[in-house]
Image (cartoon, rainbow, N blue to C red):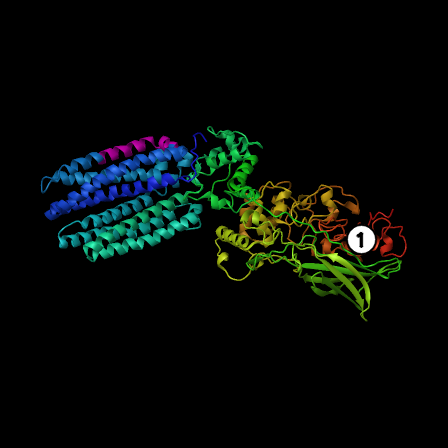
Amino acid sequence: MDYPILHWTWWGGGLLIALVATIHVFIAHFAVGGGLFIAVMETRVQRLGLGTLKDYLRRYAKFFLVFTMVVGGLTGVGIWVVIAIGAPGATSTLIHSFVFGWATEWTFFLAEIVTLLVYMSSFEAERSTRRLILAWLYFAFAFGSLTVVQGFISYMLTPGEWLATQRFWDGFFNPTFLPGLVFRAAFAALVAGVFGLITAQGVEDEGERKRLSRFCAVWTILPLPVLAAAGWWHIAVLSPEQKVLALGLSPEVASGMKAFWWAAPFVVAGGAMLAGGVSREVARKVAVFTMLASFCVLASFEYMREAARRPYIITGYMYSNGIPVARAGEINAKGALASAKWSKVKQVTDANRMEAGRELYFLECSSCHSLGGPMLDMLPRSAKYSAFGMEALLTGMGKIGTYMPPFLGTAQERAALAAWLTEGLHGPRKAEAPKFPQAVDTVPVFTDDTPYVLTAAPDRGINMLSDADGQWTLGVGTQGLTAQLIRRDIVPEAVTKDVTVTYTVADGQAGSLQPQGNAFRAELIPVSPYPKSGGFQPYPVAEVNAYDASGKLLASTRVVLPVSTELGCRSCHGGPWKHGVAGIAPSTGRDVLAAHDRLSGTRLAKRSGTLECRSCHKDVTDTQAASPAGAPGRTMSLSASIHGLHAVYLAGQGAKACDACHPTSPTGATRAFRDPHQEAGLDCTNCHGALEDHALSLLTREKALGAPAAGKLISLITPRDAQPVPREPWTQEPRCLTCHTDYGPPQGMQAYGSWSKDRAALFKHSRDDLGAMACSGCHSSVHAVYPARNPYGKMRDVLQPTQYQKNTSALGSPKTCKVCHTMDMDAPAHHPGMGLD
C-alpha cells in the first residue's frame, strides 16, 4: 500500500523473483556443500598423500570460485533488486526486523570471498597446513551464512512468537528453523557431490576417474534420506492450516510434491550409475542429467515452501499481495484505492470503473497472478466467470478456501475488480435473449348447471430440474399434484368414491392420481421444460380428468406443472447454457464436481455414472416424511450444504443471490416468482430471509444434529437481518398467516423464522378451517398464487379461475362462491376474510 506497484502483465506473479531466486538458492547451496567438499578433499589430498588429486582439486576450486562468487554474487544482488521491486513491503519488514542479522550475513559472505581468494593463491606447495585451514575456514563461513539466512527465510513461513513480541530471536529461532537448516545442509552436500560427478569426468586417468566418481556418488546419494526425513520434520512443525497445504490440498503444493518425488529417484539412479563405473561419454551425460534432477529437487522444495505460506508472504503478518493484516479493517472501511499511496485512481465511479478495476488487480492480485504469463495466468482462470460470479468469488475469497487472501476494499471496489477481470479481460458475456412464445390456452366449458368442479394444483410453483448430462443430480426434478372433485350443491361435497382421476401432460406423459382423504394425489410426475416441438417451455400444461366407475367424464380442468432447468451454476462455474437460455452444460457440470473435489478433497470428477448428491448429503425430500437421525460426524444435508457454502460467497447480495441460482431472475427465461407478492414489491428475502439468514437457519439445525462442517460455515456467515431460527428443509417453511393475520391483508412484510410446525402444515397439505378444501385448490401453489402473471401466456397460470369464474382471482373470491355452492353465501365458510362483498 505504501509502495508503487509495477504493472507487469506477462512477467507478473513474481516470475522474475522466482527465476532469480531459484538460480541463486541453488548456487548458494553449492557454495556451502562445495565448500565442505573442498575441505574434505583437501584433507584427503594432504593427509592421505593423494597428490594425484591436487590438480583435480585445483580445477574444482577454480570452477567453484567463478560459479559461486561471480554468478552467485550477481544473482544474490539480483534477488535484492527484484524483491524490492516485486515485494517491497515484505522486503522492508525483513530489513527493519533483522538489520543486524543481515549485517552478520554480509560479514560472513565477505569472509567467504576473502578466504576463497587466499585459498586459491596457496596451491604452490604439495602440502600446506595454511591451505587446509583456509578450506575448513571457508566452509565455516559459508555454513554460518546459510544458518543466518535460514533464520530469515523460515521466519516468513513460521514467525512463531515474533508476531506477539516482535523480538529478533523469537523470529530467528522459529519452529521451522532447525528442520529447514538440516534439509538445506543435506541438500548442500548432495549438490556438491553432483558437481563433483561432473568435474570428475575431466580426470584423465580412467581408474582415478572411476574412484573419484564413486566417492562423489556417495555424496550425492547419502543425503537423500536426510532430505526426506527433514522434509517430513518440516511439515510436522507447521500449523494445522499449513499442514493441509503442505500435504497437497493446494494445486501448487501438490504439483511441487509430485516433482520432488519424481526428481529424487533420478538423483539416486544417476549417482548409482556413476558409482558403477560407466564409460566417460555416458558418465558426462548422466552427471549433467543428475545435476538437473537435483535442481528440480530444490526447486520443488522452494516451490512448496512458498506455497505453504499462502495466503501470506509473512505468515499471519502480511498477505501475499504485500498488504499488512493489521490494516485490513482500515482498508475495508476507507477503500483500497484511497489507502494505496501511489494509486492513480482513488475512488470508483461509473466513468472510471474499468480503470479502477485494473488498478485494483495490480494492487491486490498481480503479486501472484500474471496476464498471459506462466505464473498463475489470470486469463484462463477468469474466463469462466460472469461479473456476478467473479464478485461472488472475491466475496468468499479467504474464507472457504484460505489459499488466497481476502479481497480488501469496499463493495464498489470489489464490483469494479470483478467487472475488469471478466468484461475487461474477455468482453461482455454474450447471452441469448429469452423468448416468451405466447400460448393460446383454452379451458373446458363450465356453466351454472355443471354438476362438478375439479380443482388441481401442483406442489411447487417453482421447481428445479438439474440436467447435468448424467454427471450429477440434486434429486429435486419431479412435481406432485393434488386434485379435488367437488359435487356442487348448497353444501358442496368432495367426492372420491368410485371416481378415477387422471392427468395427461402436454407431451403425452400420463398417469392417475390416487385417493388420499377427500382428495387425489400424484407423486413424482416426470415433467420437462423441453417440449418435443423444441425450444424451452418451463410451464407445461396438464389436463386433469375425473371419471365415474362407468368411465363417464365428470369434470375436466387444466393446470400448469412448472419445471425449469434455469439453474445459475454457469455464473461461477462457467460454460454456456445447455439449451440456449437454460440447462447445465457438460463443462459446467464438470466444474461443479471439480470445485467439490478441490474444497472437500473428494474425487467425484473421476467417477462414472450419475452422482446422486443426496447419496452423501442425506436430506428430506418432498416424498420423505422425516429427516435422518442426527449423529456425531454426520454429513450435512444437501440443503444446508448448498445454501451454507453459497451464503459465504453471495453475502450482501439480498434477493440477487436467490435469483442467481434459482429460476426467479426477473431477466431470466423462467421468471418463476410470478404471484402478487412480487407486484407488491416483495422478494424471496421477505419470507425466507436473506441468503445468510436462510443458510444459518439450516446450518444451526445441522450443528445441533452433529454435523461438524456446519460450525465452520456458521463462523464464516454474518447474520443479515435476523438471528437464525433452526429449521428442517422441505418440512419447515414460512407460514402465510405470519403476515396474513386472520387471513386478512398483510400486517407485516417479514415471515422469516415463523416456520410451519411439520409437513402436514405445509401450504400444499393445508386445509381450510373446515378441513374440507385444500388451500392450494383455491389459491394455487406457492410463488404462483392467483392472480399469477405468466410470461408465456396471460392465461397460463390462471386457467382454473378463468374456467370457473371468468376472472383471475382465487376461487371463492368476492361474489364467486357459486363456483361450488349453488347459491350466494352470506358467511365465510372456509376461513375468515374471504371477502363476500
Q: Is residue 192 visible?
A: yes
In this rendering, position of residue 208 left or right of residue 342: left
Q: x%, y% of residue 278?
A: 20, 57
Query: Looking at the picture, does residue 299 appear above or below residue 500?
Result: above
Residue beneath the point at 48% across and 51% down: 598
In this rendering, position of residue 792 left or right of residue 256: right
Query: Looking at the picture, does residue 828 appear above or below residue 352?
Result: below
State the residue position of label 1.
801
Residue 488 on the magenta segment? no
Q: Which residues are magenta?
A: 92-112
Q: x%, y% of residue 534?
A: 65, 57
Viewer-nearest residue: 144 or 447: 447
Q: x%, y% of residue 501?
A: 76, 65
Q: Main secondary structure of the magenta part?
A: helix
The disc labelled 1 sits on which kind of residue? Pro
Residue beneath the point at 64% across and 43% down: 655
Q: x%, y% of residue 675?
A: 73, 47
